[in-house]
Image (tube, rainbow, N blue to C red):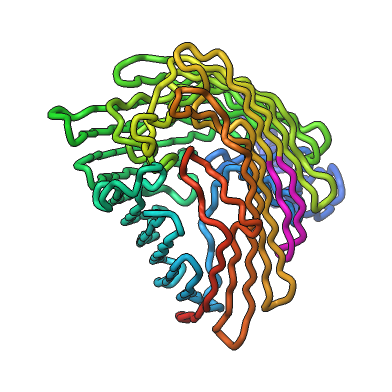
Amino acid sequence: MKKIILIALSVTTLSSLQAQKKGAQVFDTTKRTVVITSAYKPVLKPAAKINFSAASPAADSSKPALLYNVPAQNLFFTYQPASLKPLALSIDTAISWENSNYIKLGVGNYRTPFAQAGFSFGDGKNSVVNIHAKQISQKGNLPFQQYSHSNADIMGIFSTQNNTEWRGKLGFDNSTQYFYGSPDAGKYTKDSLRQRFNTLSAMVGFRNKEVNSYGITYDPTMSLNLFGDNRKGRETNFVVNAPITKTFTENFAFNVGVTADLTNYKTYNSEKSIKNNLFNISPSLIVKKQNFSLNAGITPSWDNKAFSLLPNFTALVKVKDEQFVLQAGWIGYYQKNTYQTLTAFNPWISQPSALLNTRTKESYFGFKGSAGSHFSYNAKLSVLNYKNAALFLNDTADGKTFRTLNEPSMKAIKIHGEIGYTFQERFSLLGGASINRYTGLEVNDKAWGLLPVEINGALRWRVLKDLQFKSDVFFWDGPRYLTKEGESKRLKGAYDVNAGVEFTIMPKLNLWLQFNNILNNKYERWSQYQVLGFNVLGGIVYSFSQTSK
């Protein structure tokens, strides 16, 4: 039994030793197995590359692009200049700003003293101040055929750092003439025939020099005129004008203007003053394409509380580049008739007893353009309808004054043309003509005082560096007037030729000569008021400059 037990223990011990030996072979940590899947190849990390198919960035609409319509060199439209919207000038600090000043003096026949002066101050960048003054008087051969005219003004422009430009103007004007047209003028005293007008004017305005971040430009102004005569006639005129333009894209904009024109007028024999007020609003859409531009709008107006809706449509079509342009339009506007504006047109009127504004609706079609780089032309055919047109009928009772009449309704056909030839700033020859056909008058027999035909021309020629020549030509067919017997007649046609020359005689000193009415045609623009004959003026011009950095 002992042997059997000893043999069993020996077998068990041997089996345990064999198992431990086998386990040591499987879990031996001194030996590792590595499985190689590929050979090692060092490479760089892929770098970021430019994507050539990326979309272009969106356009910056906060600063719209400005379009410039540059005409051919040497091409100037003198009679109907295109509207300009100048940008702020960046002054080159390397150059100096010159303030030009001049004094012009002269004398002539018909007892004519002449004086004119102009002065300029400021640095040309932040401020500019200009002062002008002029005086002339003449005395003809007819009794009381004399006049004098004096005026002076000061104008300033000031720029600020916040894109704002301020401007202002103060002025004074005085004119004195006599009612010498009456055949019996010798029977009157000089004081009773004297007609004197005085004007005090003031204006202030401001504008943004560049389009702001909202695409808006603005240019409001306020003006005040105090006008009076030597017969206790007084007039006050106050005008506020506020145009604003909103630019959306380079081809599309919206414009609106608000105008308030207030007039208070009182005559010597009136206890109550006459009020003449005009208000209007002019919204319009502006579309500009490469070969086409359109202005479409309306103008609601209140003429002394009477409402009227006026059209405001104009279009330009370029047929061949910019050398030939078709133009058409249907527009309406008011001519503000004040005592001041009426006397500026006819200084021989008596004090008006009423003030009515002229409303005009015009439909026109025409063309303009250029041929080559020097020749330009413009032609237009218009059909006009007037309401309360101002006419001037001579007073047959005294023979020396004109009565202001208002025609309730009048029509007209107008043909207007212009031609011009320019060569740089050395030579320019310009001419224009207007033919008016007045019809459809309801109250008056004729369009009293209005010219049916007007033709004019101007020549400017810089012959040499220090020699300049100029000439002007005028012609018109006479207007209608009444004789003492009440018969309607037409004044004779008038023609007038003027010429002048200026040349240097020494540094800063020029000599000038001016010849007026060379053909000695003593015509009448207004019935019984004969103009002066041939007259000559001459003198000197002294020019000097103030240079500042």
Q: Main secondary structure of the magenta part?
A: strand
Rendered view: 119 above or below 548: above
Rendered view: 154 above or below 258: below
Most extreme residue toward the bottom is 506
Rendered view: 195 above or below 462: above
Q: Is residue 227 left or right of residue 111?
A: left
Q: Position of residue 92 (x, y in %)?
A: 55, 71
Task: Kindly identify the residue that appears in the image at 64 percent across and 78 percent down.
Answer: 503
Task: Kindly identify the residue that appears in the image at 27 percent across and 27 percent down.
Answer: 353
232 in magenta: no
Q: Nearer the viewer, residue 245 or 263?
A: 263
Q: Nearer the viewer, residue 381 or 455?
A: 455
Task: Kindly identify the residue that appears in the image at 69 percent across and 24 percent down.
Answer: 365
Q: Position of residue 464 (x, y in %)?
A: 73, 75
Quarter of the N terminus within the rendering: top right
Task: Report which quarter residue 280 is drawn in.
Answer: top left
Task: Kindly identify the residue that appears in the image at 57 percent across and 50 percent down.
Answer: 522
Most extreme residue toward the right is 39
Rendered view: 273 above or below 469: above
Q: Position of residue 162 (x, y in %)?
A: 38, 55
430 in magenta: yes
Q: Nearer the viewer, residue 30 or 485?
A: 485
Q: Position of residue 401 (x, y in %)?
A: 36, 37
Question: Which region is colored magenta?
Answer: 418-432
Task: Report which quarter residue 535 is drawn in.
Answer: bottom right
Looking at the rendered structure, the number of numbered marks drawn on it comes to: 0
